[in-house]
Image (cartoon, grey):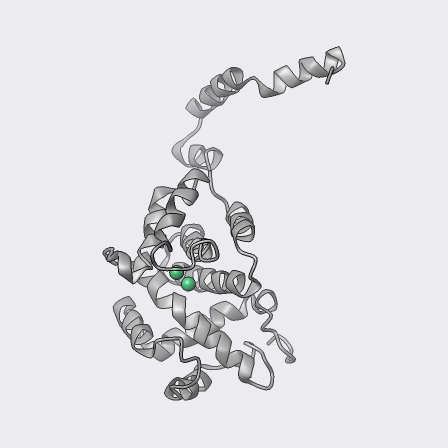
Amino acid sequence: MNLPHNMGWKRRQVYDPVVATLVAGFFNELLDDESRHYTEEIMTRAKALALVREFVKNEGLVRHMLSVEAAMRFYAEKFGEDMEKWGLVGLLHDFDWEIHPTLEQHPQDGAPILRERGVPEEIIQDILSHADHLNMPRDTVVRKAICACDEITGLITAVALVRPSRSLYDLKAPSVKKKWKDKAFAAGTSRVEMEHASQEFGIELWEHVGNVIVAMRRIAPELGLAGNVPQP
Ligand SMILES: [Fe+2]
Ligand SMILES: [Fe+2]
């Protein structure tokens, strides 16, 4: 298509990559480290959520990742760690489950996609560490956290949904404890693994359950778990 002369000029001005790189480089020289990090930011929460929505059509799976993200942000705040980074580990950890629904592929085959989309390698490695079969060392607190927060959110969701209120707002740890003893309830979640993960994380199991409920409560409407009781 023929563009009017002046429009073509504008296009050249906007898209000239050589000029853009030179200008960006010049201004970066003037910035301190923190500002440079900000200008070069390659993965934001909004981009990560868009990536999740691109690859995941099942709303239940999206909600699972939002739940784990909420729990990770809660603990990052509690420990004075990087809430954005911890949140991204939670939000993206199962992004490839729909396209890679077996442990032959998940999450390892998702890693190149994350790399391609500009997710920092450190976050990718932490995401990979949530898979037992990859035998990666869980030697940092963020890795212990993702492991401890993953499955427990599923059990908490299941308990909230069978209560009359169908809400996180009036759910407390003892209600989860009651269902914990009922082995037939949410039988797909492994009590042994959840208990072990909580121990490794260094938080007493029922305190951990209470914390994750508080974390998930912050986004209860998004999780479809506000139910029929008012927000406290
Ligand atoms: Fe996973
Ligand atoms: Fe998960």
Q: Is residue 2 above or below residue 218?
A: above
Quarter of the rendering containing residue 59: bottom right
Left or right side of 191 for 34: right
- Image label count: 0
On the rendering, which quadrant does ligand 1 occupy?
bottom left
> What residue lies at 34% left-to-right and 76% top-to-bottom?
190
**Where in the figure is residue 180, as x and y percent of width and height?**
39, 84
**Where in the figure is residue 81, as x and y percent of width and height?**
37, 55
Left or right side of 71 for 143: left
| Residue sitting at the far top | 5
Who is closer to the viewer here, 109 or 111?
A: 109
Q: Is residue 206 visible?
A: yes
Image quarter in which the C terminus is found:
bottom right
Image quarter in which the N terminus is found:
top right
**Where in the figure is residue 83, as x and y percent of width and height?**
43, 54
Q: Is residue 49 above or below residue 190?
A: above
Q: Is residue 92 above or below residue 172?
A: above
> What residue lies at 74% left-to-right and 15% top-to-bottom?
2
**Where in the figure is residue 61, as x and y percent of width and height?**
51, 63
Q: Is residue 170 visible?
A: no
Who is closer to the viewer here, 116 or 146?
A: 116
> What residue lies at 68% left-to-right and 13% top-to-bottom?
9
